[in-house]
Amino acid sequence: MQRTDPTKPWWKKHHAQRLVSWRDDFKNKIELDAYPDPGEPVMSVNDNILSIRSAAHNIRSIYFLPWVIGFWVLSISFIYDFGPNEGEVSYANYRVEKKLDLERKGKSFDKQEYLYYEALVGTDGKGTKLEYINAVSNFSTDRHRKSVYGTMVFISVLTLISIILTAGLIRFPRLSEIYFDRQRGIVYSWRFGRIAACKFENLGFREDKIGLTLFLYGESKKHKSGYWPALFGLQPTGKAHMNSEDDNTFLIAQLFAFMDKGKQAVITEERFERPQSKSYLFIDKKPENFEQRLEEILKKDNELPKLYAEHVF
């Protein structure tokens, strides 16, 4: 059987398969060597545990950060352009001087227009944003006032969105890795207080455009049973793009080698620990009563293969 259907468009999802069903296929496709550094996305290896980081570790830098930068650039550009330009300030100063000249000559002038231009340039003749707002609010026409107020509301909304996105970026925690426990023969992880796990034999996988998706059995408040397949994306090169089927093959072969033979099949040293990113201020902490909740999941995870085989997630 084929790992992927070449006739099916990549954006159309397909059913997951049991990873262990492909053990022999992956073993025959590649001959692994142990390395001092097993490569991305492996984060740590010791006698019992191999951990890999999920694709969620790239969410901030690849998907979230560009939106934050984009909104701030947009907000700052609108704030910078808001207010009178040099031509308007020069003309306002000219009209103020003209009014003084008309006064000296005893000629009439439009007082409302004068008050607007005088408020616009202020005492120093520079025409700041605050002076512009004051002039528009008190001495401009209704049409002009509504237009300026609309621009101010738009800028405020843009700035608010930028602040919210920035706060979200700062608050977004470093998510848990996916742990392969060779001693117990299980896989587990957690996200925002909810645990997902399964026996290695029940682990599901699907190859996607960006890499791999693993299917664990996770806690869920939305389903009557209290559990439902939890999906964890993987990028076998550690990058958001350019993940090929060969990259998937290498990573999966590493997982099988570790679970079947131990750390000596993957690393040359006693243990491996990849430094964590220092750009995170928060970490998604291990949930309370972890072991007890983990055992409850493992009592029921035999349902997992049936669910991911019947449903397209």
Image (tube, rainbow, N blue to C red):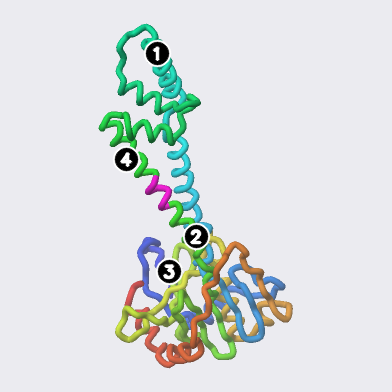
Task: Please report the residue visible at 44 percent of the width from the left and 79 percent of the height from the top.
Answer: 194
User: Do residues under tags 1 and 4 come within 8 Å of each other at their CB atoms?
Assistant: no
Residue displayed at 42% across by 78% down: 17
For the residues labelled 2 and 4, the Cα–Cα distance comes to: 29 Å
Q: Which residue is under mark 3?
A: 4
Closest to the camera, between mark 4 and mark 3, is: 4
Q: Secondary structure at mark 3?
A: loop
Contact, mark 2 vs mark 4 (Cβ under 8 Å) = no
Q: Which residue is mark 1?
A: 98
20 lies above or below 119: below
> Which residue lies under the disc numbered 4?
150
Question: For the residue labelled by badge 2, is the local secondary structure a helix, a strand or a loop?
Answer: helix
Q: Along the line of sight, which residue is nearer the eye, 146 or 37? A: 146
For the C terminus, give its image quadrant: bottom left
- Tell me where the magenta segment starts and ends, as one range: 156-161
> In which quarter of the view is residue 258 placed?
bottom right
The 10 Å Cα crowd at callout 3, few under 14, some 14 to 19, many 20 or more, is few
> Given contact means CB atoms under 8 Å apart, are the residues at marks 4 and 3 in contact?
no
Q: According to the image, label 2 marks what residue?
A: 169
Name the foreground residue: 272 vs 224.
224
